[in-house]
Image (tube, rainbow, N blue to C red):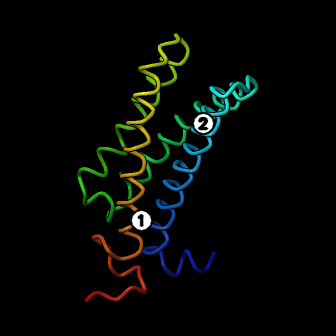
Amino acid sequence: MAVVLAAPRQAAPTLVRWVVSLHVLALLVQIAAAVALTSGWPEAFIVHATVGHLLFLLGICQGIAVMSVRSVRQSPLTASMAGILPLPEALQIYLGHVGLLAWHLTLGLLIWGGALAIWIRVSAIVVGRGENPGTSAVTRN
């Protein structure tokens, strides 16, 4: 607790990175469940559906976290991508329910790419390669 209070400037970007990283890890679980489902393991459907709903909630948390931290908010593209990402995730759930699997797969790949782009951008800021270089032990050349 004292570390967070002593260094709030460092804690906020780190918290954002954790939220974004958790979202990317949940997407990996989602992809693994999809592969297992298409490989003939029908029980993976429950995991895939549950993680899909969890991803929507994590996407909302990610959008709020990324848009609320000043150093990340300085990049309009990162903030807008994080804010918009829950919309295709909600559409993804709908497409899965109605059985439009080609669109479900295509949109899933776009969500994966967007989530990775956000993760790379937020990770760069936390380690000092972005707008907030004071949070890193990495020295600039």
**Picture layout, residue 19 above or below residue 108:** below
In the depicted view, which residue is nearer to us: 38 or 74? 38
**At which x and y percent is residue 87?**
39, 30
Badge 1 amino acid? Ser
**Picture layout, residue 51 above or below residue 90:** below
Q: Pointer 2: residues within 10 angstroms few (<14), some, or many (20+)? A: some
- Image point 47% across, 40% down: which residue? 60
* Quadrant of the drawing holding the C terminus: bottom left
Read off the residue under disc 2. Answer: 54
**At which x and y percent is residue 46?**
71, 26
Whether residue 49 is visible here, answered yes or no, is no
Badge 2 amino acid? Leu
Apparent side of residue 31 relative to residue 110 in the rendered image (left or right): right
**At which x and y percent is residue 84?**
34, 37
**Picture layout, residue 49 above or below residue 114:** above
Say what secondary structure mark 1 lies in: helix
How far is mark 2 from mark 1, CA to CA? 22 Å
Which of the 4 image quarters holds residue 5? bottom right
Apparent side of residue 125 relative to residue 22 in the rendered image (left or right): left
* Quadrant of the drawing holding the N terminus: bottom right
- Image point 23% across, 52% down: which residue? 76
Say what secondary structure mark 2 lies in: helix
Q: Pointer 1: residues within 10 angstroms few (<14), some, or many (20+)? A: many
Apparent side of residue 27 relative to residue 81 in the rendered image (left or right): right
- Image point 30% across, 57% down: which residue? 73
**At which x and y percent is residue 37?**
66, 27
Of labels 2 and 1, earlier in sequence is: 2
Read off the residue under disc 1. Answer: 123
Which of the 4 image quarters holds residue 48? top right
